[in-house]
Image: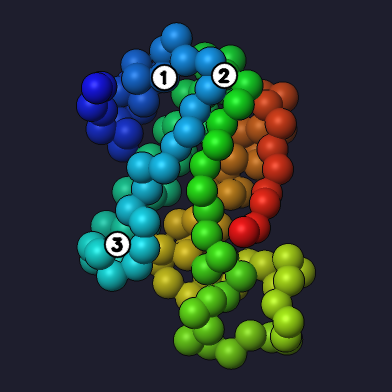
Amino acid sequence: MLLADLTEYGQAVEVLHGADAVVHLADIPAPEIHTPATTFNNNAVMNSNIFPAAAQLKIDRVVWASSETTLGPPFDVPPRYAPVDEGHYPVPTSTYALSKVVSEITAEHIAQWSGIPWRRDQA
């Protein structure tokens, strides 16, 4: 087992060195586990370290879990329309959801810069 603080870029690079692919599920997994600021900061920083570290190391496959909350659920604010689809994006209503939106945008741009394929799939 290898432990790393993914909020530190150097440690993210170190832990990914030699990898063929990355499955990154280390985000804080839901709102209200930590303070809103901690959730946003940790998730956004971890992802903004993992994605460019993978690009720097020329890892061509990164799997990362975003969230349906980027579309608005749990609908503390009513949806703009129903049924909700990809066109409803983004409607973050928590710092958790916002961290996922920021990370999706980060991943998309790093993919463009690096040539690593990017695809957004919603479960």
Q: Name the residue under label 1.
A: 16
Q: Name the residue under label 2.
A: 59
- Left or right of 13: which side holds 80? right
Residue 82, how many percent across, how many down? 72, 85
Residue 71, how many percent across, how many down? 61, 70
From this view, report whether residue 108 is shown above or below residue 69.
Answer: above
The alpha-carbon separation of the residues under discs 3 and 2 comes to 30 Å
Residue 95, how many percent across, how many down? 40, 66
Answer few, some or many: residues within 10 Å of disc 1's Cα (few below 14, many 20 plus, some between 14 and 19): some
- Which quadrant of the figure contains the C terminus? bottom right
Q: Which amino acid does label 1 sit on?
A: Leu
Q: Name the residue under label 3.
A: 37
Q: What residue type is labelled 2?
A: Ile
| Among numbered discs 1 and 3, the one appearing first in the sequence | 1
Task: Kindly tell me whether residue 41 is visible in this rendering.
Answer: no
Which mark is nearer the camera, 1 or 3?
Answer: 1
Label 2 element class: loop
